[in-house]
Image (spheres, rainbow, N blue to C red):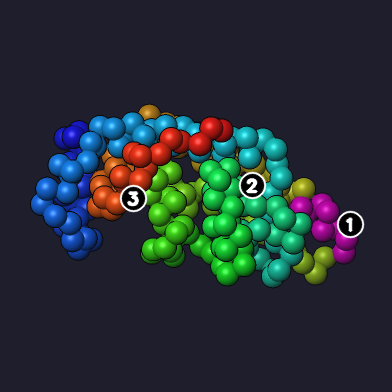
């Protein structure tokens, strides 16, 4: 096991109160786990880049101001929902759209979305960076609304570029992967599932 990951894992367990067996890390090949998460991260960042370039973003037709939109009226998915979809988890995409369409990942503490993040190669904090709220004036005239949508799409694209650059920065990537390994080791059954499966092709 990587020394850095071991230290972060110890700090994480001590600060979070997560109860794991003393030999939990010995039951997993943490080098293999990190390699799997590196591959997952690369796949998800590639898909995020493709999403950004396509500029098919969800639009806020629900309420004035900024709002996290998982899936809009036209079926456009947010960035994280797109990554979940591309990983083959359409049931999770649909369930979230139906039950928690305005979900803020920063507020999610457990369940399938957290499980997906834990095996994505990203930390929850990084997923929050990718999940961007969208803003639109729902009461505007149609022509004004079209201009607002174009303006909002440009803003989101600019933000996505900044996020993508940050997540690809080697020091941030290494630190994120250390934390991702530590958190996933605390869920040995989920870690074992990741090691037992092949990362879906992009």
Q: How many angstroms separate mark 3 from mark 2 (CA)?
A: 33 Å
Q: How many angstroms separate mark 1 from mark 2 (CA)?
A: 20 Å
Task: Check disc 3 and report the residue beneath it.
Answer: 190
- Residue 143 tag number: 1
Instruction: Name the side, left or right, on which 52 lies relative to 195.
Output: right
Q: How many angstroms separate mark 3 from mark 1 (CA)?
A: 49 Å
Judge whether residue 123 can be spotted in this image. Answer: no
Q: Which residue corresponds to the image point at 54% horizontal and 50% vertical from the top-left?
A: 89
* Start-end of magenta stretch: 141-149
Residue 136 image position (x, y, % from top left): 72, 60
User: Between 69 and 201, which is closer to the camera in this rendering?
Assistant: 201
**Image depth: mark 3 or mark 2 in front:** 3
The question of residue 151 being in magenta is answered with: no
On-image quarter of the C terminus: top right
Task: Check disc 2 and report the residue beneath it.
Answer: 156
User: Between 168 and 121, which is closer to the camera in this rendering?
Assistant: 121
Residue 60 image position (x, y, % from top left): 70, 61
Instruction: Name the side, left or right, on which 126 lies relative to 20.
Output: right
Q: Is residue 127 above or below residue 97?
A: above
Label 2 sits on a secondary structure element that is helix
């Amino acid at each position: 096991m990587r020394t850095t990951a071991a230290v972060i894992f110890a700090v994480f367990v001590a600060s979070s109160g997560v109860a794991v067996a003393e030999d939990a890390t010995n039951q997993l090949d943490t080098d293999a786990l990190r390699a799997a998460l590196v591959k997952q991260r690369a796949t998800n960042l590639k898909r995020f880049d493709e999403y950004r370039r396509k500029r098919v973003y969800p639009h806020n037709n629900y309420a004035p101001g900024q709002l996290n939109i998982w899936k809009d009226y036209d079926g456009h998915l947010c960035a994280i929902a797109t990554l979940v979809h591309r990983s083959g988890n359409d049931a999770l995409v649909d369930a979230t759209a139906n039950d928690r369409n305005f979900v803020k990942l920063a507020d999610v503490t457990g369940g399938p979305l957290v499980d997906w993040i834990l095996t994505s190669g990203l930390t929850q904090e990084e997923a929050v960076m990718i999940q961007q709220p969208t803003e639109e004036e729902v009461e505007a005239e149609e022509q004004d609304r079209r201009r607002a949508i174009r303006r909002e799409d440009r803003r989101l694209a600019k933000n996505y570029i900044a996020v993508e650059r940050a997540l690809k920065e080697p020091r941030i990537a290494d630190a994120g992967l250390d934390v991702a390994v530590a958190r996933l080791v605390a869920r040995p059954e989920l870690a074992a599932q990741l090691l037992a499966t092949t990362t879906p092709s992009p």
